[in-house]
Amino acid sequence: MPVPKAVTIPATVGGIQIVAANPSRIYLKWQNTSAVTVYIGHDNTVTIENGIEYKTGTEFEEKRIGLNDPTHYQGAYFGIVATGTADSRVDERDRARS
């Protein structure tokens, strides 16, 4: 089973890519393990104004339901913080590494 990877998220214009697009993705879990709020979006236009807010200790999880699940997002995720940096964890699995 894959080990979650650590991702540091800075207060950089456009954020950083937390997870790359992966058309084979069947599972994704991201956790905010830092003491600051992280804002998540689908591209490098993410800001603290338009990103989805994840406070300290929160997470999101996606599971693909069947091979042809049309609701399952397999694109990239980007993150940004208002100041400083945030530590986070990512666990991604695809059909080859589940």
Image (spheres, rainbow, N blue to C red):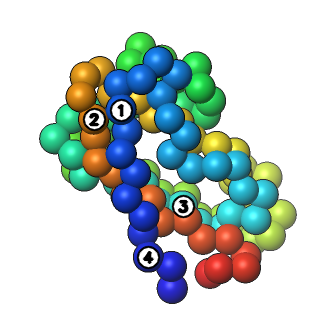
Tag 2 residue: 85
Which disc, if any, is residue 60? none
Residue 21 placed where, x, y %?
Answer: 70, 49
> In the image, what residue occupies the spot 51% across and 79% down?
2
Asked which secondary structure carries label 1, the reply is: strand
* Few, some or many residues within 10 Å of mark 3 (<14, 14–19, 20+): some
| Residue 57 horizontal side relative to residue 31, left or right | left
| Residue 35 horizontal side relative to residue 51, left or right | left
Q: Nearer the viewer, mark 3 or mark 1?
A: 1
Asked whether residue 20 appears in the rendered view, the answer is: yes
* Few, some or many residues within 10 Å of mark 4 (<14, 14–19, 20+): few
The Cα–Cα distance between marks 1 and 2, rounded to whole angstroms, is: 4 Å
* Few, some or many residues within 10 Å of mark 2 (<14, 14–19, 20+): some
Tag 1 residue: 10
- The tag earlier along the polypeptide, 4 or 3, is 4
Tag 4 residue: 3
Residue 76 placed where, x, y %?
Answer: 64, 43
